Amino acid sequence: MFSRISSAFSSLYKTLSAPLSHLFSSGKIDAGVLSELEKILLQADTGVITTNKIISQLSANSAERPQDALLHILMDLLQGAPYQDNGDVIICVGINGAGKTTSVAKLAALLQAGEKKVLLAAADTFRAAAVDQLQLWADKLSARLITGAPQQDPSAVVYQACAEFKKGNYSHLIIDTAGRLQTKAHLMKELEKIHRTVIKQLPEKRVTTLLVIDSMLGQNSFDQVTLFNAATKIDGIILTKTDGTGKGGIVFAIVDKLKIPLAYVTFGEQLTDIAPFDAQKFVRTLLGNGSS
Ligand SMILES: Nc1nc2c(ncn2[C@@H]2O[C@H](COP(=O)(O)OP(=O)(O)O)[C@@H](O)[C@H]2O)c(=O)[nH]1
Ligand SMILES: [Mg+2]
């Protein structure tokens, strides 16, 4: 069902994999190779701190073939913060247009494929169109969607959704929220209130907050992740639009600098265009399948 996964990172890979494939042709690591690698990593949005870390680890490693050494360095970096698993309640947050609503639908499809019973909540009450958009997906998924009145307090919708979750025989509740800028303090406070409402209504359930990030945004994502995480603890990231022209290095930078794991990637507009983030697969594909 999720067979398009292999092409999931096709363009993310391009910024790294094509230049990397030529880099180690001499089989050694010298100053020229290191400075070329530095350039490639920086151009791919890996960021200065994480790039320097990778370069210094690689130059200190002489025991392995250069491409194997790099593979292990990148893999260790990503595995430093693995995604645990989904809670019973998943709250999706992020800025406007990041891909929250479509990701909520895709996540529901993925859970349904695993025989889970999913309840959806549209806590984006700012725009009527936002509710309509999720309703279309819910209909497609034959999933129940809890909605509120326009401009209603999003936490009131969440409260209703929790009540329905308790009554019904659901395994998961996925909450869609309105897009917000990480710099708007009152909107960020609202997220905390949504979270508090869930904890209070469903104290025995595990709650996961996922931040939805558009992979095309590059370095700007750091501020987003940092400020969202300060407002409401972020348990994982859904990296969207990896079928676009984003750059793969951002993945290393986020995990390394912020210690927040990648949970899922999405790579298209279909319900099946989602996959759990697989660090091994991601790095192996980046470096080409010849590495061991
Ligand atoms: N190509 C592509 N488009 C996506 C992906 N995820 C979301 N989109 C599109 O991005 C736009 C914004 O998505 P939406 O879910 O409404 O974002 P929201 O404002 O965060 O809820 C829509 O046109 C989606 O179809 C993806 O993985 N790949
Ligand atoms: Mg939306």
Image (spheres, rainbow, N blue to C red):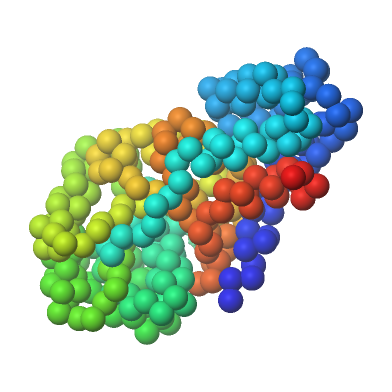
Q: Quadrant of the N terminus?
A: bottom right
Q: Nearer the viewer, residue 250 or 186?
A: 250
Query: How far across and how far down the image is residue 159, in percent?
Result: 13, 65
Between 290 and 101, the one nearer to me in the picture = 290
Q: Quadrant of the C terminus?
A: top right
Left or right? Give the position of 169 relative to 77: left
Q: Does residue 190 appear in the picture of this structure?
A: no
Residue 113 image position (x, y, % from top left): 47, 77
User: Taking 253 as reference, is 83 above or below it?
Assistant: below
Describe residue 32's horizontal placement relative to residue 50 as left or right.
right
Tell me which corner region of the image, top left, top right, bottom left or bottom right, holds residue 249.
Answer: top right
Number of labelled discs? 0
Q: Nearer the viewer, residue 191 or 80?
A: 80
Task: In the rendered view, tell whether residue 64 sits above or below residue 93.
Answer: above
* Residue 129 screen position, x and y as percent: 33, 68
200 relative position to 122: left or right: left
Residue that sits furthest to the left in the current view:
200
Say which residue appears at 74% left-offset and 22% top-offset.
62
Residue sitting at the far front: 63
8 over 287 or under it: above or below = below
Q: x%, y% of residue 213?
A: 45, 48
Do we see residue 27 in this rendering?
yes
Outermost top residue: 31
Q: Is residue 51 above or below residue 171?
A: above
User: What residue is shown at x 79% (from left), y 32% (from top)?
Assistant: 65
